Image (cartoon, rainbow, N blue to C red):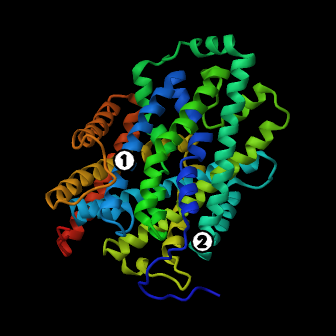
């Protein structure tokens, strides 16, 4: 029986702290790390760990900003609403639609990655058919209840976190005990640490940013928990540790064991590393873990696209029917539309060109930089308002406003420099055009119904 529609009732608050914690831990581990890391390594060589560390610092500071705004004004919804509170209704419109766009392509990328992995383990069916089954199953899970999503994502995250920590431990033991001298030669061979120079480090930024996206999922899921502000703050405190452990260390293990130019772009580098280490059955186990990680990110992608549409509809930035909540307190229309859009993105990747995963990952990485810049401006405005009103902030960004402005300068600098990297120009142009379409839609909306200042 279909859920009964109940108009604009509030979303559920069924997520527990353990759900939000593990969603934030597991949100950054998906195809972007297990598969996309091969593309990042190919762009920059072993030195790509520097790019991962730098992008990790950027995301840590953005999460810190979200935590500050959530604690200062608790219970306001997702971070899109905090952008609107800081800069005006226009910022909520732009941020919400750009973020939705990002996750639609993420759903498509994760669907294709999952279908390819499942096909590779012996499921003899067309990729598009496997992808449709995956999207259908996880759409059904999201339609059940937010608690069903949270519980499934909790266990997905537990498996992912345990697997990546085990991979790092196994790799470290192998390098120290059996491969120390060879690891140095592997790192320095084939052109050294930076075979493509500093331009390679920069070229890898969009793919790395794409792969690290997911920490802010906690800021969205927290809106459906009993204590949103503290759950966001908790995620913000630990994100740097997660990025260091899950990304920098795992990538260092990969490039220390296998020559960077031996990896195949679009295929997981984790399996050949475990094959090299020689643990019986480990490669097969890792394949199943990677499939779990991809399904986890696909699950989160469907969740996020629906919540974005719900919030946009509630604020009048999208058709009102998207704000409706079913009897089980899930935004049914948003889930179904996210499913359809993600499926179209997946089919486009399968049939339009061969290497669309890396292309769309880079494009989405550029798009999210625009979103991060809006969040940073919103945090500056919000912080100044709190200080003017004498509001004490128990959780804050350090060295304000210098750190906040440094984040903005860094983002603008990366976007400008990417314009001079030949293989990034097309993705940057597509990203700018996408942002332009959203701003044009904002302008058309303002002509028919002026956007309020806040």
Q: Does 220 sit left or right of 182 as displayed?
A: left
| 64 lies above or below 101 | above
Q: Position of residue 9 (x, y in %)?
A: 43, 84
Extreme residue in the left direction: 388
Q: Which residue is drawn at 23% across and 57% down?
A: 382
| 15 lies above or below 361 | below
Q: Residue at x 41, y 43 (%)?
A: 60
The N terminus appears in which quarter of the rendering?
bottom right
**Local crowd size for mark 2, using a 10 Å CA cut-off: few (<14), some (14–19), many (≥20):** some
Q: Does 313 sit left or right of 412 as displayed?
A: right
Extreme residue in the right direction: 280
Name the image quarter holding residue 247: top right
212 vs 175, nearest the viewer:
175
Q: Where is residue 34 in the image (x, y as percent from the top left)?
A: 62, 40
Q: Residue 147 carries which label?
A: 2
**Local crowd size for mark 1, using a 10 Å CA cut-off: few (<14), some (14–19), many (≥20):** many
Q: Which residue is drawn at 34% across and 42% down?
A: 429
Q: Does 240 sit left or right of 401 as displayed?
A: right
Q: Residue 163 carries which label?
A: none
Q: For marks 1 and 2, give the CA distance.
A: 27 Å
Q: Residue at x 49, y 64 (%)?
A: 221
Q: Can residue 11 be seen in this view?
A: yes
Q: What element carries label 2?
A: helix
- Which residue lies under the disc numbered 1? 62
Q: Where is residue 208 in the image (x, y as percent from the top left)?
A: 48, 38
389 vs 384, nearest the viewer:
389
Q: Does 50 sit left or right of 188 as displayed?
A: left
Q: Can residue 344 be seen in this view?
A: no
Task: Verify CB contact (< 8 Å) between mark 1 and mark 2.
Answer: no
Ranked by sequence position, the earlier of labels 1 and 2 is: 1
Name the image quarter holding residue 285: top right
Q: Is mark 1 on a helix, strand or loop?
A: helix
């Amino acid at each position: 029986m279909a859920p009964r529609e109940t108009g604009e009732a509030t979303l559920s608050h069924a997520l527990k702290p353990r759900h939000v914690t593990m969603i934030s831990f597991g949100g950054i581990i998906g195809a972007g790390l297990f598969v996309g890391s091969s593309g990042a390594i190919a762009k920059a060589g072993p030195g790509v760990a520097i790019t991962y560390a730098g992008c990790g610092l950027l995301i840590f500071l953005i999460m810190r900003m979200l935590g500050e705004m959530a604690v200062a004004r608790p219970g306001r919804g997702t971070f899109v609403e905090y952008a609107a509170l800081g800069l005006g209704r226009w910022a909520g419109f732009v941020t919400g639609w750009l973020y939705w766009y990002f996750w639609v392509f993420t759903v498509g990328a994760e669907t294709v990655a999952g279908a390819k992995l499942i096909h590779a383990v012996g499921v003899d069916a067309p990729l598009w058919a496997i992808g449709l089954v995956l999207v259908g199953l996880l759409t059904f899970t999201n339609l059940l209840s937010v608690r069903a999503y949270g519980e499934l994502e909790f266990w997905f995250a537990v498996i992912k976190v345990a697997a990546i920590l085990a991979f790092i431990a196994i790799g470290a033991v192998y390098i120290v005990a059996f491969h120390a001298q060879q690891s140095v030669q592997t790192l320095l061979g084939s052109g050294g640490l930076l075979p493509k120079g500093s331009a390679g480090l920069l070229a890898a930024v969009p793919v790395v940013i794409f792969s690290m996206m997911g920490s802010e999922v906690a800021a969205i899921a927290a809106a459906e928990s009993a204590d949103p502000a503290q759950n966001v703050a908790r995620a913000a405190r630990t994100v740097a540790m997660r990025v260091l452990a899950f990304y920098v260390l795992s990538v260092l293990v990969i490039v220390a064991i296998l020559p960077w130019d031996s990896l195949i772009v679009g295929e997981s580098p984790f399996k050949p590393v475990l094959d090299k280490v020689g643990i019986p059955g480990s490669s097969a186990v890792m394949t199943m873990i990677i499939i779990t990680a991809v399904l986890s990110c696909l699950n989160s992608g469907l969740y996020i696209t629906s919540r974005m549409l719900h919030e946009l509809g509630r604020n009048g930035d999208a058709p009102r029917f998207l704000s409706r909540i079913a009897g089980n307190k899930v935004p049914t229309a948003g889930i179904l539309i996210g499913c359809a859009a993600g499926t179209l993105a997946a089919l486009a990747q399968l049939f339009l060109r061969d290497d669309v995963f890396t292309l769309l990952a880079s494009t989405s990485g550029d798009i999210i930089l625009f979103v991060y810049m809006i969040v940073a401006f919103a945090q500056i405005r919000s912080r100044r308002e709190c200080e003017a009103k004498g509001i004490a902030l128990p959780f804050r960004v350090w060295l304000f406003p210098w750190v906040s402005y440094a984040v903005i300068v860094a983002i603008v600098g990366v976007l400008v420099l990417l314009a001079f990297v030949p293989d990034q120009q097309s993705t940057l142009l597509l990203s700018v055009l996408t942002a332009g379409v959203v701003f044009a839609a904002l302008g058309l909306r303002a002509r028919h119904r002026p956007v309020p200042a806040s």
